[in-house]
Image (cartoon, rainbow, N blue to C red):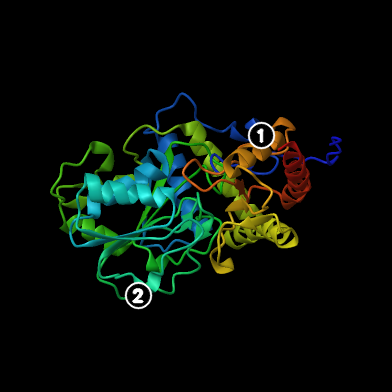
Amino acid sequence: MADKHPVARPANPRFSSGPCAKIPHFSLDLLSDAPLGRSHRAKIGKEKLKAAIETTRDVLGIPADYRIGIVPASDTGAVEMAMWSMLGARKATMVAWESFGSGWVTDVVKQLKIDAEVKTADYGRIVDFAEVDFDTDVVFTWNGTTSGVRVPNGDAIPAERGGLTICDATSAAFAMDLPWDKLDVTTFSWQKVMGGEAAHGMIVLSPRAVERLESYTPAWPLPKIFRMTKGGKLIEGIFVGETINTPSMLAVEDYLVALEWANKIGGIQKLIERSTTNAKVLWDFCDRHDWIANLAEDPATRSNTSVCLKFTDDRIKDGAAFAKAVAKKLEDYNVAYDIGAYRDAPAGLRVWCGATVESSDIEALTLWLKWAFEECIAAQ
């Protein structure tokens, strides 16, 4: 087949689902105010960390009585910190429909050995939250990054509940409307919707979560990086910028720059709007072509950040090999980087559509995606 590929390429071919694309017009010059070579415990370091916490509260609309902390090991560290510190006080319910949620199930059931009911759904589907007992402690992901399936809303979570809700919101925060009154522990990382750098996690605690921390001591020993209390009281310093371990002040500055950009463009509602506009380009593309589809079966649960796609053409002989060939061809032409499906997910593509991505780049990508599909079909 003649190589008649589209002419226009995405201006930014970075569609990775983490670390994600930097904010529009990013330059290293924007980080010139980073206090490099200074202690994070110096006055300037503490000020930067506290600013990151309070600006996060401002952008996301987190209630004033919720604690926000910067913690080690990205979102994974934040989730583990919550589970190791708070679970075991009562029965738990583990909810999973993709690989990261399944990982939390493994940690709770096999490592912590907590009495837990496990509710799962296949990739492309979601667990029915109406069947979840919220008088237990419930652990779930808001957005399944590897499946492209998200919780549509918090309606099924009762305001009056006996247990805690522990929500991994790492690819949802800053792109989806999170009902803070329904979430007791919320975790996320900087390298998702905000395009920040890796290794730093955020943990948000409701008053109910703080009460659990101060009234319950787990039966197992807690590593230092998981400890949020001392002498039965919350370590308040964690939630004003006195981090447990040494953070990168360059990464902190990068996060502050992204938060400033978010405020300038209109805050959380504009971030949600940008993400949804981006994702809709791909949703509409799937509607126009019968050889590709959204992995999420119910449109109400489609992610507007990690959009997962599957090839449905009967001519495809080996689904996994075909998806890899398409992704490789797009990368070889510098059109799209890192868009192969996650290793545990069904064969296909995963295109990040978070707020730092431009819809014009998604539009350009769709033209190349059609071309790459046709090329790979012909090459079988």
Give the residue displayed 49% in from the left and 40% down from the top: 343
Q: Is residue 107 left or right of residue 378?
A: left
**Disc 1 target residue:** 328
Q: Is residue 117 left or right of residue 375?
A: left
**For residue 294, above or below residue 236:** below
Task: Pick whichever of labels 1 and 2 is earlier in the sequence.
Answer: 2
Q: Is residue 268 visible?
A: yes
Give the residue displayed 22% in from the left and 38% down from the top: 223
Q: In which quarter of the image is the N terminus?
A: top right
Residue placed most toward the observer, 268 or 53: 268
Q: Is residue 151 left or right of residue 266?
A: left
Q: Residue 150 carries which label?
A: none
Give the residue displayed 86% in from the left and 38% down from the top: 4
Residue kind at label 2, given as amino acid type:
Ala
Pinpoint residue 157: horizontal percent, then vertical percent. Answer: 38, 71
Category of crowding for the residue at label 2, using alpha-carbon neighbours closer than 10 angstroms: few (below 14), some (14–19), many (at least 20): few
